[in-house]
Amino acid sequence: MKYFIDIAYDSVNKKGEELCGDIVEIVRNGSSIIVVLADGLGSGVKANILATLTSKIAATMLKEGLTIEETVDTIVNTLPVCNVRQLAYSTFTILKIEEDGRMYIVEFDNPPLVFIRDGKLHEIEKTPRFINDKVIYESNIKLEQDDLLVAFSDGVIHAGVGEILNLGWQWENVSKHLARVTKRAKSAKYISSDLVETCLNLYNYKPGDDTTVVAVKMRKPEIVDLFTGPPENKDKDSMIAKMLMNVKGKRVVCGGTAATIVAREFGVKIIVDVKTMNTKIPPTAYIKGIDLVTEGVLTIGRTVEIIREFSAENKNKSVSFDFRKNDGATQLAKLLVEDCTHLNLWVGKAINPAHKNPNLPIDLSIKLKIISELVELMKKIGKKVKLTYI
């Protein structure tokens, strides 16, 4: 496991439209990943149908091993013709990524890709091909660690037209912005979300076009082991502590009982950090050898809320989060979004006596449901998750 291919996308609908005219399709096919960004003609329902057909056809045919000529020909002959413009039209960008970093790229009428390596913009060599009276551009590159490749619809370079900018946000400005962001952001999700949020600001929250961003980041795997307990069988206390001692990645403990178990087995003290306490989230703590120690259900529940809002692909309102806050939920959310590619969850199935108190919020009785939601959210943003009950 030399590299982790981090892929994320975000979009915003044109003002007044319920459906987005840009569609992203991601298909995992063994050791390769196929990503299609399609932008349908116009906006709303018609554009959504054109883009959906394009993305589904391209992803399915390429997954089955058909050629790009056959794929483009099928798209051209399948799309319904617009009665007004007499066109059956959808632009698209196709990425086929192998696990070793080899990438095959096909571009048709979308804005050029942005490719950043070592914090600097790099040009991608393209070869034009004529298929069915249409010019597509093919490229082959090899991604290296920390390389960033970003595809986007023309809503990005139109951002600001009629609002803040007269001529929109030019491609050169977009690429410079991405070069700055990638210096401080690890995850593809953070990068795609940041770019769409910036476009939304330039549009003054009244998007004049569907706007979609797909980010691909080649990352070194970062493993997080998170223990929330206690185990159903007390004899497993020593086992889980030894497991945490021996893992190579970051260690997280959530829950007072879980923290007590780990501190006891490690032979160290728990030090509570009262500076991280607020009216909604209990304070974090410090245990020597553990990267983050938080309260249990309340903190994980709030973490799920933060990640759910942050990870939503369609951003028709501001969803920026200040990951510099020091409360336990924000720290945990930042770690899971930015500093994690593989999450190992160790969940104790013992019933905490405190959770049986009828005077406490109902949230405290549904730990397993919250954990299940966390698993699904982490998978949704492209993380590898392993869940073990103890």
Image: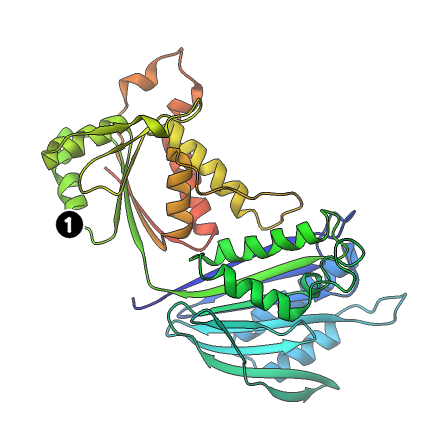
Position of residue 67 measured from the top left corner of the image (x, y, whole percent) = 57, 83
Residue that appears at 56% across and 80% down: 66
Q: Is residue 175 left or right of residue 155?
A: left
Instruction: Kindly tell me whether residue 133 is visible in this rendering.
Output: yes
Q: Is residue 81 left or right of residue 244?
A: right
Residue that appears at 83% across and 72% down: 87
Q: Residue furthest left?
A: 267
Position of residue 276 measured from the top left corner of the image (x, y, whole percent) = 36, 30
| Of the pair 258 and 358, the residue shown nearer to us | 258
**The quarter of the displayed image where residue 271 is located:** top left
Above or below, comparing residue 121 to residue 69 in the picture: above
Above or below, comparing residue 372 to residue 84 in the picture: above
Q: Quadrant of the N terminus?
A: bottom left
Residue that appears at 40% across and 15% down: 360
| Of the pair 139 and 200, the residue shown nearer to us | 200
Q: Is residue 40 left or right of residue 277?
A: right
